[in-house]
Amino acid sequence: MRDDTARAIAGIGIPISPEMIAASQDLYQSQHETVPYRDVTVTRDHTYGPHERQRLDVFRSTAAGGGAKPVLVYVHGGGFVAGDKRIGETAYYDNVGLWAVRNGMVGVTITYRLAPEAQYPAAAADVGGAVKWVLENIAEHGGDPENVVLLGQSAGSTHVATYAARPELHPRKGGGVRAIAMLSGVYDFTLMELAGNARAYLGDAPDAAARGSALPALATAGIPLMYGISEFDPPMFHEQAKALTDALYAQTKRFPNVLYLPRHNHISQIAHLNASGTEDRLFSDRLAEFIRVNTARALTAK
């Protein structure tokens, strides 16, 4: 990361607010690709369910050949009550779908139902609905339905974790995915005082926090995991990463695949993905290698 960018991120501060989000995204906006995207076809708003928010976009290369490609499905954040797969005319989160294409994959970005209209586990069930759509349709877009990887950020990470932890949400045994990557999610709600947005999603039942937590079941789900945390994430996300690390280590007696992103905050961690002119490739390279290793294993097993 360039020093001027790092100083700007540090100056934005840690607490998450609309102003903090906008300032963090603005740092990278000019470094992202703009429509029309070179050598990429994007098909918008495929429906994977009847609700107006059950939609997804597919990104694929226009280059011929190469066979069916691994698929990266991205689940956005938004604190359980906000967010979308595409934020107005900004680069977000087309940048994730484009990153997938630029790294030899098919990209999928999804939108899901929000609280308070849709409470737990609706958003995680929507992850399952999107995975089901991908398994049934992605071959038509050049993707390999046997090599699907999930990526979630913030609340999206929580929903992906919940999906992994609840087999009844899976359209196929094992979740239908080869691996899951997560950035700064909540995995155990019992460790935190529930804010209004979390209560809007979990509800007010006495056991809502425990019932809505992906842990401890996530640690035994059997799906390869990579997860990350940013230096300037709020403390609660560091605590959540530690809880997941402790649970996974207790289960496997091996240190898990954890990524620490120095000088990043809760928003820049995903906003910088696929940005041009940046030397900061730590997350990009680790994510690409994580996907390559796990999809290569699947291909070898065939």
Image (tube, rainbow, N blue to C red):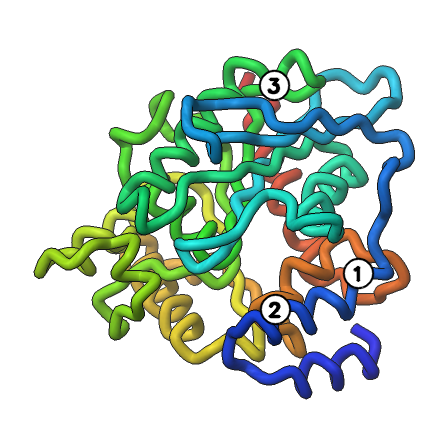
> Could you classify mark 1 by the number of other residues whose Cα lies within 10 Å: few (under 14), some (14-19), or many (20 or more)?
some
- Please report whichever mark, 1 or 3, sits nearer to the chain's N-terminal start: 1
Contact, mark 1 vs mark 3 (Cβ under 8 Å)? no
Dot 2: element = helix
Q: Quadrant of the image for the N terminus?
A: bottom right
Residue 20 falls in image quadrant: bottom right
Q: Position of residue 197 (x, y in %)?
A: 34, 62
Which residue is labeled 1 in the image? 29
- Residue type at mark 2 is Ile
- Residue type at mark 3 is Ile
Q: Position of residue 295 (x, y in %)?
A: 60, 32
Q: Is residue 274 left or right of residue 157?
A: right
Q: Which mark is residue 138?
A: 3
| Res 296 visible | no
Which residue is labeled 2 in the image? 21
Q: Quadrant of the image for the C terminus?
A: top right
Between the C-alphas of marks 2 and 3, the distance is 32 Å
Between the C-alphas of marks 1 and 3, the distance is 29 Å
Q: Position of residue 206 (x, y in %)?
A: 8, 60
Q: Is residue 133 left or right of residue 64?
A: left
| Res 148 visible | yes
Q: Residue at x 89, y 30 (%)?
A: 39
